[in-house]
Image: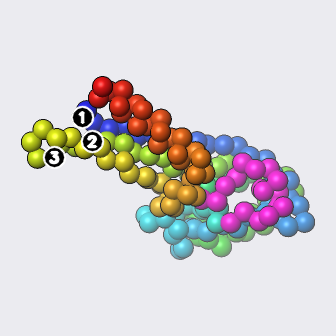
Amino acid sequence: MNGSAMYTGPIVLDIKLKRGPQGLGFNIVGGLDQQYVLNDSGIYVAKIKENGAAALDGRLQEGDKILAINGHKLENLSHSAAVELFTSAGEDVQLRVQQRVCGTTVGSFHSSGTSQSTVLGWSCSLGHIVAKCFTTDDKNNFLLDTFRYILRDIA
């Protein structure tokens, strides 16, 4: 088995939230002056507040990148400029969000002579540990499915 398969892919969502007593119910990090991800000045969700608008909706997750708010792109903004856009956005807020990309990279290599080994490495675009990306059951099921797929090709 030579080669590898990558199970990842960004998902972009449009999420409409109604501002509640706790605001939109999440904190942000990032910006030109406070990069959260190396070489990326994007704005990211740092924390979802319990019982806030974002938590009640359920689609926005910690680590997601916010691409736009009410049609205003969040590219090349300082952190404070992004905060100002959020605070002045009004009661009904439309977010365009790129969900964090997490998955598994499966590959193989040849070591001395003809023996072959399989390399299984977890990857996540924001450097989060896999526990933040998958539940234990999801991770275990994914691993089992991956190994079944690999064994199918070997057998």
Q: Which residues are magenta?
A: 47-63
Task: Look at the picture and state if 18 lies above or below 78.
Answer: above
Q: Given the image, on which type of amino acid does mark 2 rest?
A: Ser
Q: Position of residue 18 (x, y in %)?
A: 86, 53
Task: Report how far apart the C-alphas of labels 1 and 3 lie in the structure.
Answer: 12 Å
Which type of secondary structure does the marked residue at label 1 adopt? loop
Mark yes or no: residue 74 visible: no
Q: Which mark is residue 108?
A: 2
Task: Report how far apart the C-alphas of labels 2 and 3 lie in the structure.
Answer: 10 Å
Q: Residues within 10 Å of mark 2 (few under 14, many from 20)?
A: some
Please give left or right for residue 106 compared with residue 84 in the image: left
Q: Position of residue 20 (x, y in %)?
A: 88, 61
Depth check, front residue: 31 or 103: 103
Q: Position of residue 110 (x, y in %)?
A: 18, 42
| Residue 49 part of the magenta-drawn span | yes
Q: Give the residue at mark 3.
A: 111
Q: Position of residue 108 (x, y in %)?
A: 27, 41
Q: Given the image, on which type of amino acid does mark 3 rest?
A: Ser
Who's the residue at 72% across and 48% down the image? Answer: 59
